[in-house]
Image (cartoon, rainbow, N blue to C red):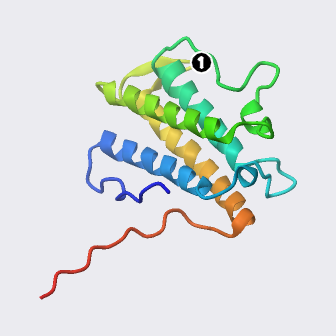
Amino acid sequence: MPERTPDPAFNGDERTTLTGFLEDQRKVLAWKCQGLSDAQLKEASAPPSNLTLLGLVRHMAEVERGWFRRRLDHQKIGPIWCTDDQPDADFEAVGEADVAESVRIWEEECQDSRSILEKLKSLDLTFRTDEVISARWMVNHMIEEYSRHNGHADLLRERIDGMTGDFPPAKKEPAPAS
């Protein structure tokens, strides 16, 4: 299980605060998938939706790659699973997907994203898609993207085994004896 980490800095600078919230959201998704079998991760547990926890992990790997590596870092790489013929393969092609490989790819994309973000001199940096977008906007968008999908993950996980919430409470250090 991902370790419970302290909340993002209450008085941190902008970058520290934003990256802290993004990391927290990544850990929530990992925690939602923790302890389940491959079959459970592939289970569409909230019919009629075909959404699965593994589909969410694969989707977030695509999103990490798309925003950080392809757009912000201008890497000339394609999507991981999605194609012109199957634009939603991240969500839809989970039946035969290798769970460990999918999780590994997501973790690697998250690490690549962290590295790219760490190298930025400023969140004011912009890049062009259809619009001129700042790195600041993009990081906020990533927090929103994870938050929305973590809500889905919460419902899926609850239907699978009843688990709800995000992390268990952080362990508190005992108060010093007086």
List the single residue furthest toward the right: 48
> Residue 122 occupies which quadrant of the picture?
top left
SS label for mark 1: loop
List the single residue furthest toward the left: 178
Residue 19, given in percent of the width and then of the height, sits at 38, 42
Residue 109, given in percent of the width and then of the height, sits at 52, 31
Residue 142, given in percent of the width and then of the height, sits at 52, 39
Q: Residue at x 80, y 25 (%)?
A: 86
**Disc 1 designates what residue?**
130
Residue 151 visible? The answer is: yes
On the rendered structure, is 45 left or right of 118?
A: right
> Residue 99 occupies which quadrant of the picture?
top right
Residue 137 visible? The answer is: no
Identify which residue, 88 or 105, lies in the foreground: 105
On the rendered structure, is 147 left or right of 117?
A: right
Viewport quadrant of the C terminus: bottom left
Q: Residue at x 25, y 79 (%)?
A: 174
List the single residue furthest toward the top: 76
